[in-house]
Image (cartoon, rainbow, N blue to C red):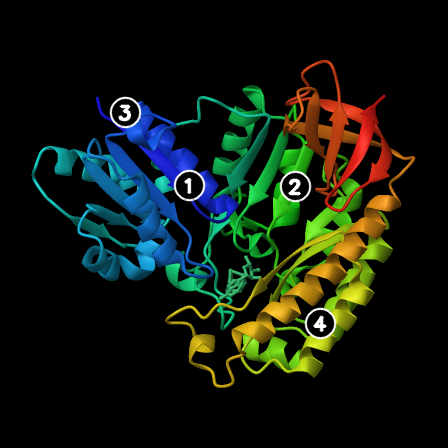
């Protein structure tokens, strides 16, 4: 049977999809290999959110393709948005499949191997067939993601996601609980409920009340139910939209002990004018009021955010508004990007595109400011003992890297293997991007 190699770009949703796709192919008898040169089938699972995605993809295909490769398949968000352009630009691509169609990949591979077809494009929105068709994961990790929702109805004017992932769809509660139970029974200890917009989750309830219409659950109820499953030690969810963040969700942070006191709540800009142009649905004052309310309800809560600098029409004053918001919000960790025009989105056609040089300068200033806050937060942890889950080895032989509940990296030196283990760690010092500690 043929072997396959998957290269995944972009967000955790893509990592999750790639994992499911690999399980599906392994269940059909294909072998997964980690070296592209050993593979008969090369699969590229792509992201189209920012930057020169197509250019990078084509150069990777050129670099990784060998004479052994019989099939090249490109999946995910670029394939959804630009399949025809991909086929024109790279004659070696055989299959282009969107994010809703990866469960069809084995069928398409077989068809090409048998010589029935030479090139296949599938950009259909099959809705959630894929989640229920994929077999259960065999190699369960101590930390697992579960997609609870996919797609987005918000249409932020810069974002390609509503066009590539489609409208919002929430998986039924029953399916999510079954998946969580399977993962926990097979060794998972941390679960991240994942989606483009998880706080608008509205999934079919696991049971019906006689005489009542079919009910749906929101994320608060889902978190409560998942948190009761045996074996779960840490629960997270991501990513949220500030306008959908309600007090019930804030309160469950106090009610569920395994739920981390940390949430990603992307603001994108501090300027009301830019937020309006972005179609974000809130002002900077409304956003900050939500953070304040959250801190009142759950005093231990910490926040992270995403930012875009250089959105069309952003002036120096608008950018200063973003810096002012950062000062007030006090984030623990954040991600910031230069605005990147995506073909087909309204912002790509807006006037007053900001020069690249200005975007670079603003990004540097913003990242310095965010890093300063992160270091201040990390310094305040010195002398405290925290429970850390260890994910991987560090550069030195006895070094291990884990995360605290605030998603900060924690580095320790230890004789025993710590990967996949929880340990109490005394924080000794703080560096730029991590803290150093000692297992106690
Ligand atoms: N340009 C730059 N950043 C973008 N993001 C989404 N679309 C774009 C774009 N066109 C960022 C947002 C989002 C994160 C996942 O990616 O900050 O929250
Ligand atoms: Fe994109 Fe906005 Fe939807 Fe997030 S909320 S996925 S940024 S459209």
Considering only vertical position in the picture, is 150 above or below 26?
A: below
Does residue 277 appear left or right of residue 151 in this picture? right
- Residue 386 in the image: state x and y as whole percent: 82, 32
Q: Which residue is mark 4?
A: 322
- What is the total number of numbered labels drawn onto the structure image? 4
In this rendered view, identify the residue nearer to me: 241 or 50. Answer: 50
Q: Quadrant of the N terminus?
A: top left
Q: Which residue is mark 3?
A: 30
Q: Are marks 2 and 1 in contact (CB under 8 Å)?
A: no
Residue at x 65% of width, y 41% of height: 236
* Chain-order first, disc 2 or disc 1: 1
Corner quadrant of residue 132: top left
- Residue 17, numbered circle: 1
- Residue 236, numbered circle: 2
* Chain-order first, disc 3 or disc 4: 3
Residue at x 18% of width, y 48% of height: 120
Does residue 263 appear left or right of residue 68 in this picture? right
Q: Residue furthest right?
A: 383
Task: For marks 1 and 3, give the CA distance.
Answer: 17 Å
Does residue 99 appear left or right of residue 418 in this picture? left
Task: For marks 2 and 1, give the CA distance.
Answer: 19 Å
Callout in the foreground (3, 4): 4
Instruction: State whether residue 271 appears in this view.
Output: no
Task: For marks 4 and 2, give the CA distance.
Answer: 27 Å
* Chain-order first, disc 4 or disc 1: 1
């Amino acid at each position: 049977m043929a072997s396959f190699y998957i290269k995944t770009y972009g967000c955790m949703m893509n990592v999750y999809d790639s994992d499911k796709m690999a399980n599906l192919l392994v269940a059909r008898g294909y072998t997964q290999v980690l070296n592209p040169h050993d593979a008969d089938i090369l699969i590229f699972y792509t992201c189209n959110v920012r930057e020169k995605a197509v250019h990078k993809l084509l150069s990777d295909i050129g670099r990784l393709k060998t004479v052994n490769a019989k099939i090249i398949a490109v999946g995910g968000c670029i394939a959804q948005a630009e399949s025809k352009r991909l086929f024109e630009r790279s004659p070696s691509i055989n299959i282009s499949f969107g994010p809703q169609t990866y469960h069809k990949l084995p069928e398409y591979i077989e068809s090409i191997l048998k010589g029935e077809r030479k090139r296949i494009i599938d950009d259909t929105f099959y809705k959630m067939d894929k989640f229920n068709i994929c077999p259960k994961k065999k190699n369960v990790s101590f930390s697992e993601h579960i997609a609870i929702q996919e797609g987005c109805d918000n249409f932020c004017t810069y974002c390609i996601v509503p066009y590539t992932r489609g409208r919002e769809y929430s998986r039924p509660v029953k399916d999510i609980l079954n998946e969580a139970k399977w993962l926990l029974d097979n060794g998972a200890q941390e679960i991240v409920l994942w989606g483009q917009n998880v706080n608008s989750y509205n999934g079919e309830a696991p049971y019906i009340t006689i005489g009542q219409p079919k009910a749906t659950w929101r994320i608060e109820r889902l978190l409560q139910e998942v948190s009761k499953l045996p074996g779960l030690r840490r629960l997270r969810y991501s990513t949220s939209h500030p306008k959908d963040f309600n007090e019930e969700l804030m309160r469950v942070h106090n009610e569920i002990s395994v739920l981390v006191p940390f949430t990603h709540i992307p603001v994108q800009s501090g300027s009301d004018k830019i937020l309006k142009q972005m179609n974000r649905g809130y002002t900077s004052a409304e956003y900050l009021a939500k953070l304040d309310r959250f801190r009142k309800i759950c005093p231990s809560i910490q926040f992270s955010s995403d930012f875009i600098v250089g959105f069309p029409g952003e002036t120096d004053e608008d950018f200063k508004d973003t810096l002012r918001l950062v000062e007030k919000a006090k984030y623990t960790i954040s991600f910031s990007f230069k605005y990147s025009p995506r073909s087909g989105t309204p912002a790509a056609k807006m006037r007053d595109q900001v020069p690249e040089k200005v975007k670079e300068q603003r990004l540097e200033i913003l990242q310095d400011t965010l890093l300063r806050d992160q270091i201040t937060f990390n310094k305040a942890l010195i002398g405290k003992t925290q429970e850390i889950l260890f994910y991987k080895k560090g550069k030195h032989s006895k070094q291990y890297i884990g995360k605290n509940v605030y998603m900060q990296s924690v580095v320790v030196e230890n004789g025993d293997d710590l990967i996949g283990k929880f340990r109490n760690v005394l924080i000794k010092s703080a560096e730029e991007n991590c803290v150093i500690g000692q297992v106690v």
